[in-house]
Amino acid sequence: MKALVPIMITSRSARDQLSAAAISSNQPPRCAFTGELDICNCDSFRAQLSDSLPIGGALVVDLHAVTFFSLSSLQVLLEVQRLAEVRQCDLLVVGSRCVDRVLDVAEVAAEFTLLHYIPN
């Protein structure tokens, strides 16, 4: 198991972090995000997800610790979902309450494979 490597991103809160890690060699890679995802850090959000997408296989997008999820962040997630389809990669999303709410209100939850747990 590899340790999480935190990468600070510009945001409204100094505590917001972006981290990514491979869970293990036989599990899909995981990108984990905490804090607020909004217009201030959408570029970092997009870059981290795009750079982590494998060709084939799957990527777990762990948003369970996200406390604010903006429509601009949703747009990024939809863009990355389209890129994942091109790369024949399954994008597996673990959402927090606020993420799930935005997906439901925008009526796009069906666009994603939503998980209610983080795979080991």
Image (cartoon, helix red, strand yellow):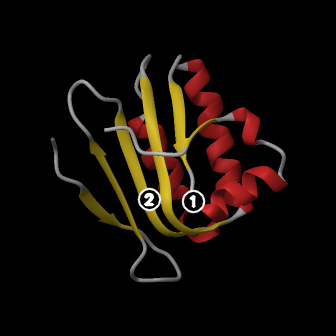
Instruction: Residue at 68% x, 41% y: name it.
Output: 78
Q: Position of residue 61 (x, y in %)?
A: 48, 44
Q: Mark 2 points at which residue?
A: 33
Q: What element carries label 1?
A: loop
Of residues 94 and 7, the one nearer the viewer is: 94
Q: Which image quarter holds the C terminus? A: top left
Amino acid type assigned to the residue bearing label 2 in the image: Phe
| The N terminus sits in image quarter | top left
| Residue 99 on image: x %, y % | 64, 58
Residue 106: x and y in percent read 83, 51
For label 1, the residue is 96
User: In this view, which residue lies farthest toward the front?
Assistant: 116
In the depicted view, which residue is nearer to us: 119 or 61? 119
CA gap, disc 2 and disc 1: 11 Å
Identify the residue at image location x=42%, y=20%. Answer: 57
At a point 74% along the width and 51% down the height, the residue shown is: 103
At which x and y percent is residue 53?
44, 32
Q: Which of 95 and 13 is in front in this view?
A: 95
In the image, residue 5 above or below residue 115: below
Sequence-wise, the earlier of marks 2 and 1 is: 2
